[in-house]
Image (cartoon, helix red, strand yellow):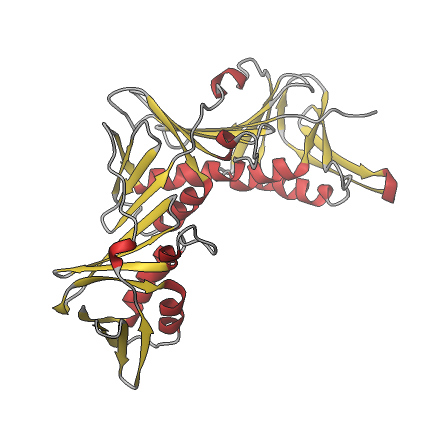
Amino acid sequence: MRFIVSSTDLLQGLLSVQKVIASKNPLPILDNFLFVLDGNSLTITGSDAETTLKTILTINEVMEGGEIAVPAKLLTDSLKELPTQPIEFSTDADKNIVNIIWASGSAQIPFVSADEYPTLKELDSPTVVRMKGAILADGINSTLYATGDEELRPVMNGIYFDIEEESTTLVASNAHKLVYYKRNDVKSGGTSSFILPKKPANILKANLVKCMDEEIEITFDKSNNAYFKFSSFLMYCKLVDGTYPAYKSVIPKNNTNVISVSRTELLNATKRVAVCSNQATGQIIFKLAANQITITAQDLDFSMSAHETLGCEYEGDPMEIGFKSTFLIEILGNLTYDQICIRLSDPNRAALIQPAVQTEPDEEICALLMPMRINN
């Protein structure tokens, strides 16, 4: 293998793939990048056995192709110290050494045979869904924070893709809060679903920034294997095995008490008051009356309390309802709309938090937050 490439271009490719490599891998070979140079295309692969990410670089100056496995951390650390310049990358097959030559110096690092690097699985009768990179990015950004961390219920630890003929919905929940992001312009030929684990979701989130205008092809099968294909990236991952809870059944339909308020003002007021909430529960209380919310918190053990009153539009009965401040702050911090509405039924039932006006006609986003019992 021998080629010349920009040090910055190569480093960017390595860094994008390196995110998938685990600190402790099940196989020693997975501590390496797989380099495959075929014609003018250099494919760089990283994997932790469960998730695999490939990126493709176009190399203009190729003298010899080939396949090798190169120590990931060693190569990345070496290139991080170089300013932008052409580098020559060549292998010595007799010594199993990679020679990296730049304008003022050179380095030699070992490589190993690519034969042991695991190959990707072929999908069995896959389902195919396509959506814009911007839509997939919005869906992941809108839901990922609400996923759970439950060893006994792994299905809650990922994003659920609920694919129907006329729409696609991304859902995440930790049983205390639930968020769904629905798109009516992402359609399929039938109904299907899968659960995307957190790690590949985070990897997609990072790489989608560069691919917002692309169409992303998602293919998956019943054996819980999935591929996400971009123009210059390919990600394979194992999906979460299991059945996601029937999320539609827990979304209330008759919440008739409605608050309309500035999201930023409510978020900032909640943050200020929450400082004085009970350290164990994090509870804050909303006291609702005509056109105002009074937010209160207290920690009797440390003689702390705070309150703040906000103007709003409120249609409904006077009410007091408690929430866990950290969950509410997460939801308000991840919504991107200026004005929101909070729909309530009574102090013991879930609140629905939605944009006051849906500016994107094909998009529907909603958060559900369970209340906390108020101890008087």
Tell me, yes or no, if residue 266 can be seen here: no
Q: Nearer the viewer, residue 199 or 133?
A: 199
Q: Nearer the viewer, residue 115 or 166?
A: 115
Residue that lies at the very extreme toward the front in this rendered image: 94
Q: Is residue 251 left or right of residue 190?
A: right
- Number of on-image labels: 0
Q: Quadrant of the N terminus?
A: bottom left
Q: Residue 176: where, in percent of width, then height?
A: 61, 29
> Which residue sits at x=35%, y=38%?
136
> Which residue sits at x=45%, y=23%?
243
Residue that lies at the very extreme toward the top in this rendered image: 254
Q: Residue 298: where, in percent of width, then height?
A: 81, 38
Q: Residue 3: where, in percent of width, then height?
A: 18, 70
Q: Is the residue 5 above or below the residue 322 in the image?
A: below
Give the quarter of the image for residue 67: bottom left
Q: Residue 267: where, in percent of width, then height?
A: 61, 41
> Which residue sits at x=34%, y=38%?
135
Q: Is the residue 78 above or below the residue 28 in the image?
A: below
Q: Nearer the viewer, residue 352 or 10?
A: 10
